[in-house]
Structure formats: C-alpha cells, structure tokens
Image (cartoon, grey):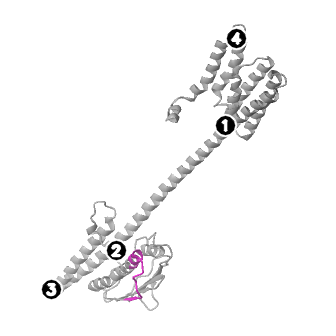
Amino acid sequence: MTVRHRDRVPPLVWDAALPVLLLLNVVTAYPARELPVAAALTAALALPLLWRRRAPLAVFGAVAAAAFVQWLMDVQLPADVALLVALYTAAAHTGRRGTLLAGAVVEGGAVLACLRWAPDGAFLTPFVALSATVVAAAVLGVNVRTSRAYLAAVQERAERLALHQEQQARLAVAEERARITREMHDIVTHNLSVMIALTDAAVYAQHRSPDRATAAMLQVSETGRQALTDMRRSLGVLRADEPDAERHPPPGIAQLEALADQMAAAGLPTRLEVRGGHAHVPATAQLTVYRLVQEALTNTLKHTPAGTRATVLVECSAGSVGVDVADSGPRPALPATEPSGHGIPGMRERAAAYGGTLRAGPLPGGGWGVRTRLLLNSGGAASA
C-alpha cells in the first residue's frame, strides 16, 4: 500500500523535497551575514537534483562542481548530502563506468574535506566514515539498477510466455477445428454415400421387390440416425449443455464389422479380417483405424461401378496397427496435382499423427488400394 501511494506522487515532487528542506535549513540556521553565501552554495548544490532523473551524469557534474567551489571558499554546509544523492542517482541510472567515475570523484572530495575540516590528528576516523557513506550510496544505486533490470527481464519473460501461451492456444484451436472438420467430412460423406446408394436401390426395387425396397429404406433411416449420433458425439464436446447420456464411445476396431455390413447393404460387398487382439490399442488409435477404413470404403462406393468387391485387413501387434483396404473396381487415372479435398489428404493427416505413411493408388493386379501402419508408441496419440 505504501508503494502504491508513493507511485501516485509525481517524481518531481520527491526530487524537490530535499532542495526545499536544505534551503529552509539554511534560512533558519545561518546568521544574516553568512546567509547570502550559504544560500547561494546550498542552491547550487541542491537545485540540480530536480533534474537528476533526466540527466544523472550532468546533474552529478554540476553538484560536484558546486561542492568544489564550496571547498575552495572553506564553507561547510549540510547541503553536501546532495553529492551523495547525485552519486546514488548516477549509480542507479548509468553503467559501471559512470558509477566508478562518480564514486572516484566523491571519494576525492571526501579526502579533500577531511584534509581541510578534520580535527588535528583525527583524519582517519572521518575519512573512514565518509568513505563508508560514499560506498553505501554507490552500492545502493547499483542494487536499484540491478533490481530494475531484473524486473524488466522478468516482465519481458512474462510477456513472451503470455504470447507463447496465446500462440499455443490458437494452434490448439486450429488443430481442434481441423479435427472436427475431418470428423464431419468422414461422417457426412460416408453416411450420405450409403444413403444415396440405398435410396437408388430402393427406387430400382420398389416395383419388382417391394420387400427389398422397404428394407433398403429402413436401412436409410438407420444410417441417418447413426449419422446424427456420430455428429452429436463429435460436436458434443463443444456444447456445455450436452447431456452425458447422449455421448457415446467413439467407434473403433470392434465396429468395423458393422461398417462392413453397412457397406454390403449399400451395394459394396466387403470382407473384413482382423488379425491379432486389439484390446491394447488406445481408443484414439482405434478411431483413426475406423475412419481410415470408412473413408477408403466410401471412396470405393462412390467411384466404382456395381459389382465391385472390397477387402479390409487390420493387423494388430504390440506396437503397431496395419490397415490395408483394397477393391476390385476400376478407377480413373490419378490427377496431375494432389487432390484438394478432405478425403485422401485427411487420411494422410490421420496416419501421420501416428507416425504412419499412407499409400493410396492403383494395385498391380487391378483395383485400388489404401495401406498404412500406425505406430502406437510414436507419440502421435496426443495430436490425434
């Protein structure tokens, strides 16, 4: 509280306090015949302190010159304390050279003062006392300068840390947006593709086989509900009022069989094979496997003719999970540039989060294949 009240007072008021007190002391303590000289010397010593913060070395030089004139005139004044204040200011606002120079000047003045005004045979005692005062003023100024530099460094570090934290927060937001974009793309693209295929099948079979048309439309309804559930789960973390009962565990390797059945119902017969146990695979890695298979099968459903078949092979080991999706349908030639959509690029990003490199392209024997291997100990789970 004391520091806060002190900071409210302008610095000039504090700088003017000592000159005013010294001048009042001269006016009240000295006789009339000595007053003009004493007042003039006191003013020469004290008044420069008003500008000590703006030009510390210049003010010190002016005060030292006035003190030397005082010594030549053989006049002792309480205003000599202004020399110590000027030394403190020089040490607090200048570097090592300025502090040493100012200290040497004041120490020389102490020697001259003791030589002229010390009692006979008592030079050492006042000299030690004055020297200790000079050293104390210089050390106090150096400590203040060091403290200011330290506080400035701490403040700069805090500002850099705040900026770094803000940048990290922005990166986290960008990564979360990218994750949600990938999730929404996978969910919407897959389910809409399945629903379109089922609707086409229902339209084709509505007259010849009404039962099959009805089953297809029921499958469309189920697919739509599943899409809404997936979207609610993915976006539920963004809403504080989303009840926990509406949140479901993310899909994983165990749900691949249901995905294969769904693709088969949409017109893409899919054979699934899972090798090795997947209980040790983290949930985020299982979600990545599910989304990779889902995207690959969705692309096959969208870009291949009827009669195409797909195979999915998932190999689980202690430190990795391999994903291999292939189909038997023809594909158009690859474009000259990397596709700009969220399909294959999104799959590459998901695989890269687990240290995997995704390969997607035509197979030597015909068809299209997508293959990658996720490294479970690659540290990518956090970014996934």
* Quadrant of res 104: top right
Per the image, is 36 magenta?
no
Between 136 and 156, the one nearer to me in the picture: 136
Report the Cα–Cα distance between label 4 and label 1: 33 Å
| For discs 2 and 3, the disc positioned in front in the rendered view | 2
Q: Amino acid at mark 2?
A: Pro
Q: Amino acid at mark 3?
A: Pro
* Quadrant of res 135: top right
Instruction: Identify the mark nearer the N-term, 2 or 3.
Output: 3
Report the Cα–Cα distance between label 3 and label 1: 98 Å
Residue at x 71%, y 23% (from the top left corner): 80
Q: Which mark is residue 210?
A: 3
* Quadrant of res 105: top right
Picture layout, residue 36 above or below residue 314: above
Q: Which mark is residue 302?
A: none
Q: Which mark is residue 250?
A: 2
Label 1's element? helix
Between 323 and 211, the one nearer to me in the picture: 323
